[in-house]
Every structure is written in C-alpha cells, then in structure tokens.
Image (tube, grey):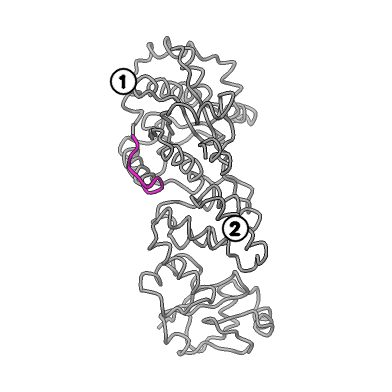
Amino acid sequence: MKLSEVLRERGYVYQHSSETLEEITDGKKRTVYLGIDPSADSLHVGNLVVLLALRRFLEDGHSVILLTGGGTGMIGDPGGRSGERALLDEETIAHNSARVRAQMEKVFGTADFNSVNNADWLYDLKLLDFLRDVGKHFTVNAMIKKEMVRERLDAESPISFTEFSYSLLQGYDFMHLNAMHGCDVQIGGSDQWGNILAGVEYVRRASGRTVYGLTVPLLINKATGRKFGKSEEGAIWLDSAKTTPFMLYQFFLNTDDDAVEEYLLKLTLLPKSEIDEMMQKHASAPGERQAQRLLANTVTELVHGADAAHSAEKMSETLFGRSDAAALSKDEVTALLEGVPSLQTRVGEPLADVLVQAALAASKREARQFMADGAVALNGAKVTDPSRVLMKEDFQNAPVAIVRRGRRNAAVLTLGS
C-alpha cells in the first residue's frame, strides 16, 4: 500500500500545500521535519497523531528531523493562547527537549531520526540582516490575516511584536533545514497551517526551491469537544510521572463508543483489518467494551511498553471486578491508589457512609437504595444488605478493598489504624 493511501486510511491528512498528497508522499524520498514546542518536559496524547504519521514516513524510507524550538521557545507561538506565554530559560528548554526526544524514540520504535535545536542558528542572527533578508518576504497584511493573530486582535487581547514575529522565525527554520539538510516537508497539527504555509512561501521566494507543508487533524476529545493539549485541563501526558500507565489505560478504557474507532486508527499501529474486525465485535456486544480494552492496552503498550500495559490492565480488571486485588503487587497497589479515588476507612464503618464519602452516592439514603438494588459490589461480591458494615475480613486477602457502584464508578478503600 502506498504511503498516501496509508495516511488517508488512518485519517492523518488534513491539508497539504501540494496539488496532490501523492506529490509529497509517493515519489522521491523526502526529509520531513516536525517542530516541537519545548514548553513542557513531556508530550501529550494529542501529539501521538502526528508522531504516528511521522512513523509511517520513517517506515516508508523517508528521513525525519525533530526540531526543538530552543530559540522560538523563548518567544512562544501566539496560537491557542489569549495572552502572552511565559518565556523559558535555556536550561529548562534543554531539559524538556531531551525528555521529548526520549519519548519520540519510544513511539517511533527507533532512534534513527535527526534532532536539531533552532537555538543553534537563531541565536547567531543579526537583527538588521534578519529584517533585510527575511522580513522583506513577509507582509504585515498577510500576517494579520493569520487565524492565530486575528483571534487575538478580535478579542482585543494584546499581542506583542515578539509573538507577532514568531512565524518569520519558523519560516527561517524551514529555510535553514532546507539548505543544510535538504529538508523539503514540514508536518504539524492543523492549527499550525498558517505558520507552515508561511515557511513554504518564504523558501520559494527566497531560494526558488519548492518545499511542502502537510498537516494532520487535531485529536478532539469527544467527551469535552476540545482538542487534546498540554494547556487543557486534565491533560493526558506521555510521561509516567505525570500520567501513570494505569491512568492512561483508564482514560482510553472510558472512550465513548462514537470515538473508539477513530482513536484505534489514529493512535495505534494495528492493521485496519484488525480494527474493522474488532469494530464488528464491538457492534454486536458494545457492553463488553472489547474495542475500548484493545485501544487502552495498545496505546499504553506503545507509550510505556508491554509490561506496563499488562500491569495497567490487571489493575483495571481488579478495579472493575474481573480479578482479585490479592493478585496485585505492592507497586500496582500504589499505582491504583494514585490513579483512582481512595478512602481510608475503619472496621465497623457502615458501607452506606463509605459510598457517600467516596462520592459514589449523594446521600446515605441513595447509598442504601443502590445496595438494595444490587448496584454495589465490594471486592467483586454484590452487596444487597443496606446495613452492611466493613469487616476485617474485607481486607484480609489484600491491603486494599474495592467498592464499585455500577460498571464505571469505583473507589479503593484502605484500612486505617
């Protein structure tokens, strides 16, 4: 299958500056670059879409360059912000860049790609030379029409000249990579289209050479209607210290039915035939959430490895009554306590009180009704007695007890002294 067909099949194509996608993907082997904003020491799940699209380029024999914005990161892209970004120091940028590089190696499954930092050439620029040689190829008329600038102006939110000049610097990056590395394609999220196109035009005007831009759709969280990003509330990180493998697994396990096929296509390397087969199984028995479990396991394995994915799956199975908490290791118990609501309890405490304290019921009356209706389980066993209290035996097989209300609401209980 041609690369263009693969990219379309997976939903990785949003815009391209060439007349046809095939012109970029299916002819000569290209050198493709992705610019990363080093404002955080971790990528997030929204980045996986463009990373997996890039992996397809690598697997097809193209070259890839990771550009860390060590220079532009000290300015900040005005896009997606209502105000100016905080500027970063060199030490922070270097630290963040190294962490991001390591994450990309894991997602790519190889270290066979080039890394550059635009601080290496932007720091040496002289202002007058830059204004004369670069600035003359950009018009203010065109720059203020860019969506990211227009939004700030329409909202009467100040935009500094520093931020306004960002697209010039990004265009200069493309020119530098083209001259030094033969780079002829820039890829990015669809929100970067204006900056990417500015670079394409700048290279053409300044050198006469043809380069290309390609964007992938932003990944939208169907539950919130907002893009996945590091600035969004509840960001899902690839760094296990920020989002544990168990939390990552649980996030995708809770994917809505109307999003799971898209996420399987865009966030995994599973063959489409396997995804199609899984979606048929899912359609026949959606309550079993087979597609969500496949998605959660596959993404967690891609980001954190097979062992972490297996451990996260085991914790999830324990949490939702498919296996015994006694089978969890000490580290898995710790991760479970970090990843889901937990509550310290005592022997003799009414389970109705525990359900309220764990936010699994709004009141004791409601908690008792849940139990009477058979909607509550303790360590996998259904509780039907509204007067049930916690007993020492509930914690004998494991250092924790699991209380569930319904299929998707659970809490971990620990026994206080």
Image quadrant where residue 376 sits:
bottom right
Residue range (magenta): 106-114
The amino acid pointed to by label 2 is Glu
Numbered label tally:
2
Q: Are marks 2 and 1 in contact (CB under 8 Å)?
A: no
User: Disc 1 marks which residue?
Assistant: 124
Which sits in the foreground, 239 or 174?
174
Q: Who comes first in sequence, dot 2 or dot 1? A: 1
Q: Residues within 10 Å of mark 1 (few under 14, many from 20)?
A: few
Residue shown at the point (55%, 52%) measured from the top left = 264
**Image: 296 above or below 204:** below
Horizontal and vertical percent for residue 247?
Answer: 48, 61
Which sits in the foreground, 351 or 55?
55
User: Disc 2 marks which residue?
Assistant: 277
Which sits in the foreground, 275 or 355?
275
Residue shown at the point (53%, 60%) measured from the top left = 294
Measured Cα–Cα span from mark 2 to mark 1: 55 Å
